[in-house]
Amino acid sequence: METLVGINSAVSSFVWGAPAMVCILGIGLYLSFRTRFLQIRKFGLALKMTIGKVFSKDVNREGSITPFQALCTALAATVGTGNIAGVAGAISIGGPGAVFWMWVSAMLGMCTKFSEVTLAVHYREVDDNGTLVGGPMYYIKNGLGKKWKWLGTMFAVFGVLTVFGTGNATQVNTIITSIDEAIRSFSSVSDPAMGKVNFVLGVIIAIAVACVLIGGVQRIGAVTEKLVPFMAVLYIALGLGVIIINFKAVPAAFGEIFAGAFNPSAFTGGVVGSMFLALRKGVSRGIFSNEAGLGTGSMAHASADVDHPVKQGFFGIFEVFVDTIVICTMTALIILCGKTMIPYGDTAGAELTIQGFVNTYGSWVSVFTAIAMCFFAFSTILGWGLYGTRCAAFLFGTKSEKPFLIIYAFVAILGATMDLGVIWEMAETFNGLMAIPNLIGVFLLSGTVIKLVKNYFSGDEYIAWKDQAERLR
């Protein structure tokens, strides 16, 4: 284990070093300039296009899901422990200023996610099962040509490895943490007994995940469109209560966030003294949360029944806004306003967020936070399960999907018993490795994004890439 941690630390330092920060933020800024900050100019239209589709149930194409189901499936993967445990970890290691850098990465990430989704819909395919599939590996292969297929393959390989940690083990670990906190708030339970409970919970989660995922994208979409709105409303309602009750502490919390972005030591007792550490943790945990730059969310959006890629691209903007600007900010305020003792310099997780709720409402609320976090984490497992099957099918064909899902489901048992710090650090590393091939592909295909945006707003007929190829023949 020590050797594994050492290797992971070395790779993570390289992946999330200065070049990676420049690449992630730089490409987001580049895309924003090329689209003339479309995520800001057309934000009102994005809200209209997304919220207006909430009650749309029409699907005209077999093997697809509604645009709103695609959004909920993508949000199911993004709105999870990254918003709860991820924000807590960013604050404890990078100081309150890490939240500021989360916001910065999210503002630029809205345009990155818009571009990823647009490209995924434009270059999507129909697999052997008649299902619409797309994502970074497909827009790299179909957009850049066969000579770039190796880059798409690299993304898919990292994707298969990432989903086990980011999409599964970290999520299950957060479910277990929240349930353990709830149990311990009412009674004293020995560690051996709690270990047995955790193992049983891991088995139950594994079975539940398998039952949903084996039903395919349609079943995932049907579950997430009900689960995501419910869990988001529950969490936001509880979070707003904390903020309202502690409203006098809100200005000071924002002060810590803004000032701590450039002078972390002033608020962390000198434990966190590096502005770059605050930036690094804010950006890395922000990407862990909203996935802008990873390209993963575009795999869900690629299955949407939509007649123009840009229409679904607006859902990408809305997704990042809800995930980071709304929910991550709320989590930060729950921790900073909820009189939570933050162990600066140490790895922390969902327990900081739970403590913020408990300090405000009392121990009884731990039951509700446990339920909310279980929904958050379970939905994320479903979303990332879809991403894993897409990557596995790209590498090994559609016959590999069910064996992959069975293995993926039972990783939940490991997630219920492994150490939190190791899981989070490895998940962060694989996230960074996924981002590299995806960002290269998005950068090289940025011209296509601009053409599609111009095509959409000019009202000209949209021609999919396959239709274009056939006409050229």
Image: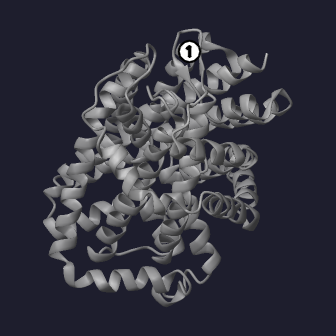
Give the x, y percent position of residue 332.
Answer: 37, 68
**How far from the left and from the top, in percent, is residue 433?**
70, 47
Q: Is residue 216 left or right of residue 158?
A: left
Judge whether 261 appears above or below 279 on screen.
below
In the rendering, at what x and y percent does residue 229 appear? 26, 42
Residue 336 is situated, as x and y percent measured from the top left of the image, at 33, 75
Query: Which residue corresponds to the image point at 72% horizontal and 18% vertical from the top-left?
Result: 471
- Residue located farthest toward the right when viewing the structure as drawn: 147
Residue 278 or 418: which is nearer the viewer? 278
Task: Report whether residue 223 is seen.
Answer: yes
Could you tell me the amino acid type at mark 1? Pro
Residue 64: name its quadrant: top left
- Considering depth in this image, is 59 or 349 the residue closer to the camera? 59
Would residue 433 appear left or right of 64 to someone viewing this image? right
- How many C-alpha atoms fall within 10 Å of the one at disc 1: few (<14), some, or many (≥20)? few
Whether residue 346 appears in this view of the structure is no
The quadrant in which residue 147 appears is top right
Q: Would residue 430 appear left or right of 178 to someone viewing this image?
A: right
Residue 3 in the image: above or below residue 244: above
- 199 relative position to 295: left or right: left
Q: Is residue 466 above or below residue 94?
A: above
| Residue named by callout 1 | 403
Q: Residue at x 78, y 36 (%)?
A: 151
